[in-house]
Amino acid sequence: MAGAKSLGVHQVFLPAELQAKIGDTVKAVTISSDELSSRTSLNLKNIDNFLKSVRIDLIIGSAVMLLLVFLGFLFSILGLQFLVYCLVLIGWILIAGAFILCGVLLLLHNVAGDTCVAMDEWVLKPHIATAIDDILPCIDAATATESLTRSKEVTSELAKVVNDVIVNVSNAKFHSPIAPASSNYNQSGPLMPMLCNPYESDFRDRKCLPGEVSFEDAPKVWKGFICNANVISGQEICSTVGRITPSIYREMTAATSTSQNLYQFTPFLINVANCSFEREIFSLIGTDLCPELERHSKGMYCSFTVFSASMILSLIFWMVYVRERRHRWYSKQFIAREGQAAQAEENKL
């Protein structure tokens, strides 16, 4: 829209009042988009850093605990009681950290559920202050409506500028050799078709009339009305049959292209600006993804809790196994000494 301010066809431009309105609208939308971009970028960075930290902690914690389980099992089999007790001490410290991670995972599970609830609430009331509004602000309804109205006005006015030049210059007949040089450049031949204006004066949709060309067809149709031109005293003058010079054609197609872009893409941009697009996306997320997200997050913290509990049991079993192994060793030693004493008594007799 900002580029439309400087567009003109054969020195015919948009009204100065409309150019000022375009500047105000672009400024309002730019401020809102900058706020949206900065806030979402900051929140994305913070959330991403937090999730990366949790992921790294989970990987390291799981790897260390698995290594501890393996070493504990090995030392228990070998009967290395001192090392097992050292591992038990380290294990209790790791288990405390594991339960802290379980709490973090439970927090993430609750955050996921609360986020889904907040998105559902935001879908129903996008312009009411909600929890999700701190992450993704919306342009107010007045600004969104103003932007849409201004885009329609610019689209319509650009079409009028092109048609004014076609009617008053390109299709005009200049019989007098003293006609203004800017308007009389020896144009001749069949009359050019006018550009279809997609809006009525009140910006309601308008159907194209017979003989008008659409935005898509205009460049191809008008290309057949270009004359060969020579530059005389800084002015292009047609030397062959044609209604427009190459420079006027370029100006017309530039204005038509801008008008077409506004006509096709502005409604979508307004839907993004007033959060209609986001509401649709969040609605799909709440319906399709939130149940799975909550189920998987619950499974994560439940699994880690079970893993931590099993680690506690492993520590207890290591201690019991080593103690029983040591007890059996002492029992064997005692039985052996008793057997040797009995043998000695028999030998004396």
Image: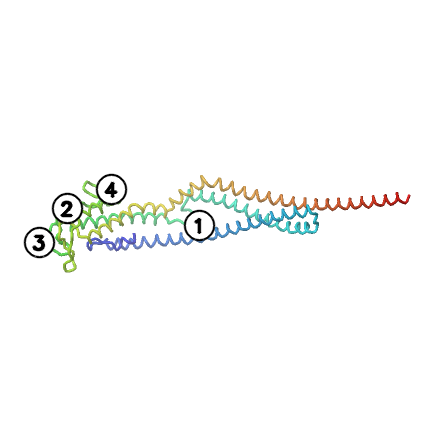
Instruction: Give the class, few, some or many, for how many residues have Cα within 10 Å of label 1's Cα (few <14, many ≥20).
Output: some
Q: Earlier in the sequence, mark 1 or mark 2?
A: 1
In this view, the residue farthest toward the front is 347
Instruction: Give the class, few, some or many, for how many residues have Cα within 10 Å of label 4's Cα (few <14, many ≥20).
Output: few
Q: Secondary structure at mark 4?
A: loop
Q: Earlier in the sequence, mark 3 or mark 2?
A: 3
Q: Earlier in the sequence, mark 1 or mark 4?
A: 1
Check contact, mark 3 vs mark 2: CB within 8 A: no
Q: Which residue is mark 4?
A: 206
Residue 17, picture quadrant: bottom left
Q: Which mark is residue 176?
A: 3
Q: Which mark is residue 267?
A: none
In this view, the residue farthest toward the left is 176
Q: Which residue is mark 2?
A: 191
Q: Earlier in the sequence, mark 3 or mark 4?
A: 3
Q: Which residue is mark 1?
A: 135
Instruction: Give the class, few, some or many, for how many residues have Cα within 10 Å of label 3's Cα (few <14, many ≥20).
Output: few
